[in-house]
Image: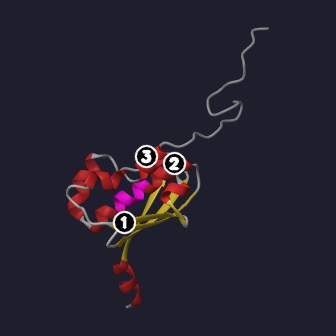
Amino acid sequence: MASQQKASRYIEAVGRRKTAVARVRLFASSRSSFVVNGMLLEEYFPVELWQHVVQAPFAVVREQHNQPYRVSVVVRGSGKSAQAQAIRHGIARALEKAEASLRPLLKKAGLLKRDPRAKERRKFGLKKARKAPQWSKR
């Protein structure tokens, strides 16, 4: 019974990018706020581009769905850019859970697809994943 009440308070989803994993919780609220790892969005992501990446799902669905949410995110792994993209993925998935009619908008914008690109592993005999040692004829 307690788990059903807890589940109805917020919508939770997981977003991923490279090795970054973001646990996103959307709370229905009277005004919107954004907390990432216990810090405000502007403090955690000082670069404006990252802030726009994180808020992209809300910008896409703004006309059709204008309910404000309080967003709480715990993100781990990778760098700031990949973390921002992981949060964007998690928010898009949570919005889809909240209202299934938003799926076509989010899907068309490419926000529901996990970006599969990641660092390629280093192979033996090479300096990096594909970089070979300098070749010498003599």
Q: Which mark is residue 53?
A: none
Identify the secondary structure beneath mark 3.
loop
Majority secondary structure of magenta residues: helix
Disc nearest the viewer among 1 and 3: 1
Q: Is residue 51 magenta?
A: no
**What residue range appears in magenta?**
88-93
Quarter of the picture containing the C terminus is: top right
Q: Which residue is mark 3?
A: 115
Please give the residue where the numbered disc 2 appears in the rendered image: 82
Rendered image: mark on residue 32: 1
* Whether residue 112 is visible: no
Which badge, 1 or 3, is on the more N-terminal residue?
A: 1
Q: Residues within 10 Å of mark 3 (few under 14, many from 20)?
A: some
Q: Where on the picture, by quarter, is residue 68?
A: bottom left
**Type of the residue with mark 3:** Asp
* Circle 1: residue type: Ser
Residue type beneath disc 2: Ala
Label 2 – label 3 distance at C-alpha: 10 Å
Q: Nearer the viewer, residue 114 or 52?
A: 52
| Label whose residue precedes the other's in the sequence (2 or 3) | 2
